[in-house]
Image (cartoon, coloured by chain):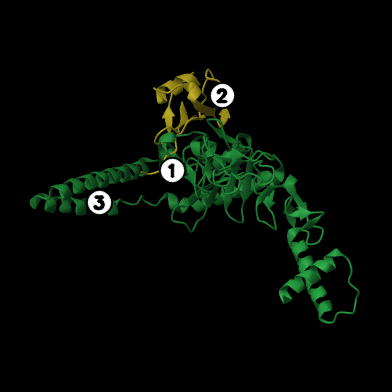
Chain colours: A yellow, B green
Amino acid sequence: MRILVINNDGGGFADYVEVEAGLTVQKLFSRHVPHGVARDYLIRVNRQPTAPDQVLQEGDRVSFTPTKIEGAHAA
Amino acid sequence: MPETRRRESIRAACRIVAATRTAAVEPPPLPLAAWERVAALAQLLEVAQARRWRHAHERCRERLRRAASELRRQLDECDGELARRTPDEASTLRDVVADLDALEREFVDVRIDLKESLLAVVTESIVLEGVELGPFEIELAWDRRAVRSFSYAVRALSPRPATGDESVVHPHVRDDQLCEGEGHAAIRAALHDRRLLDFFTIVAQTLATYNGESAFASLEHWAARRCTDCGATVDDDEGSCCERCESSLCGDCDCGCSSCGRTACSTCGASCAACHEHCCQSCLEKCSHCHEDCCERCCHDGECSICRTAAADEQEVNSGEAAADPPPTPVSGDSANAVRLGEAALLA
């Protein structure tokens, strides 16, 4: 099935990806943010807060946004 | 959501999509200026090397390295923009409407101004390491005439600027501009794809994060006490407090009441109109004649020394005028005798 994955960490990846049926939010997170910890991210499915064990559906929009984003001015 | 608000959201979404459609197909600008700078510095380096100017060579090498690093950054940005999804894949009208609906749930307040082409959200009060900076408004403007269709500003709604710089209302915000740091690429990507919810969320999370190593002003500039009278920073080991309102005073503004010695700020004290000494409010009295505040030393029986002197002068003038045409009055008593004795002595 096809879902939209948005990773607002770093470069801001956003694209449609093919995933297997029955995939949970937690597993998708581990796949796209391998070194991240879920509690350090705002995880939304279809723009709503979600539980880690929620099973994804065809056409879902999943976003991962870090809770800590360091601002900095140009040196 | 009320029907009128819903209609306003849909109207705003239509305008946003229409305004950003043209810009989405524009190719990213190539970093030609950065490349020209690298080439010019490389030439300078060659000259310095050929003439064996060691100091100039070292400086040119450092400048060339910085210019090359900047060129690499701009090329990465260009590459990133080319790699992004095509305009057709950017958020649709339905997506933008859904984002606007979600903003209502995510933020304290959402403001849509169709006339000014503005969409703004209000964050919760931002607290960084115990320092409260208040709520911020993130204002996104769309304009079909602009080269870059979106622009945004970040404003403090209850500004509490850093000590010594009124333009810095957050460690990473100066003159309403956020220094995006780690969020730069994600913000650009979100705006490019018209992902408004993501854009506002990333900016809000950047505001909620403190990076002490690269801030316009460190949080110490908020924690520091500020002199109530002159606004200067007051270090913990210097200055004092007004004994009436307990506001901080720096060493220069810390002056005690000339009557009772207690420290009073300029709001809780004033200068005596007669002697100009600083006094606290309790030691000042209003003169019944001129209604000016005067200290206890200058004010007697409700009359200040200036008014007393003026009254005495006036009396003297009046008595002088009277003496010019004196009526023949009998003089008696010791004081009168003393004058006569004095006159006698002068005459002798």
Q: Nearer the viewer, mark 3 or mark 1?
A: 3
Tags 2 and 1 on a common chain: no
Marking on residue B35: 3
Given residues B94 and A8, the one toward you in this image is A8
- Secondary structure under tag 2 reads loop
Identity of the amino acid at label 3? Trp
Residue B243 at what x, y percent from top left? 67, 39
Instruction: Work out which quarter of the rendered image holds the C terminus of chain B and state it.
Output: bottom right
Given residues B276 and B340, the one toward you in this image is B340
Q: Nearer the viewer, mark 3 or mark 2?
A: 3
- What's the CA distance linking mark 3 and mark 2? 47 Å
Specify whether B238 is left or right of B246: left
Tags 3 and 1 on a common chain: yes
**Vertical side of B339 occupied by B263: above or below:** above
Residue B94 at what x, y percent from top left? 56, 41
Tags 3 and 2 on a common chain: no
- What's the CA distance linking mark 3 and mark 1? 23 Å
Identify residue for label 1. Answer: B188
Identify residue for label 2. Answer: A50
Residue B128 at what x, y percent from top left? 53, 33
- Secondary structure under tag 1 reads helix
Q: Nearer the viewer, mark 2 or mark 1?
A: 1
Given residues B67 and B266, the one toward you in this image is B266
